[in-house]
Image (tube, grey):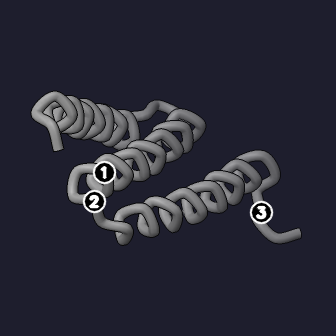
Amino acid sequence: MTTLLSLAINITLLSVLLAMLLCTVRLLRGPTAQDRVLALDTLWMCAMLFALALGIRFGSVIYFEAAMLIALTGFVSTIALTKFLMRGEVIE
């Protein structure tokens, strides 16, 4: 791996970690439930991006599979939380 690519991946990892930290703060301090759901949605996207960047950095397929699982689980949880906030129940 070239030094420029390594530097770019390190900057990406630091940026995603900072975004995850800010999302965690919003998740804990969010004034409304909608803010917390949005922060949780952004947090799982950041976790997926972090796993993808680690997969590129280390050249391992397991990180890409973990990113796919994070994406699927995050999407389903976002839909469930949104439905719960709108109707008060998840399963009709």
Cα separation, mark 1 vs mark 2, equals 5 Å
Using the image, determine if residue 91 lies above or below residue 35.
below
Cα separation, mark 3 vs mark 2, equals 42 Å
Residue 58 at x, y = what percent? 21, 58
Mark 1 lies on a secondary structure that is helix
Tell me which residue sits at (27%, 59%) in the image: 59
Mark 2 lies on a secondary structure that is loop
Kind of residue at disc 2: Gly
Tell me which residue sits at (21%, 34%) in the image: 5
Mark 3 lies on a secondary structure that is loop
Q: Is residue 86 visible?
A: yes
Image quadrant occupied by the C terminus: bottom right
Q: In the rendered picture of this protein, how many numbered marks are placed on residues? A: 3
Kind of residue at disc 3: Glu
Q: Quadrant of residue 8?
A: top left
Q: Which mark is residue 56?
A: 1
Image quadrant occupied by the N terminus: top left
- Which is more toward the observer, 62 or 20? 62
Label 2 sits on residue = 59
Residue 50 at x, y = what percent? 32, 48
Q: Quadrant of residue 73?
A: bottom right
Q: Nearer the viewer, mark 3 or mark 1?
A: 1
Contact between marks 1 and 2 (CB within 8 A): the answer is yes
Contact between marks 3 and 1 (CB within 8 A): the answer is no
Cα separation, mark 3 vs mark 1, equals 40 Å
Label 3 sits on residue = 89
Q: Nearer the viewer, mark 3 or mark 2?
A: 2
Among the two numbered marks 3 and 2 on one chain, the one whose residue lies closer to the N terminus: 2
Contact between marks 3 and 2 (CB within 8 A): the answer is no
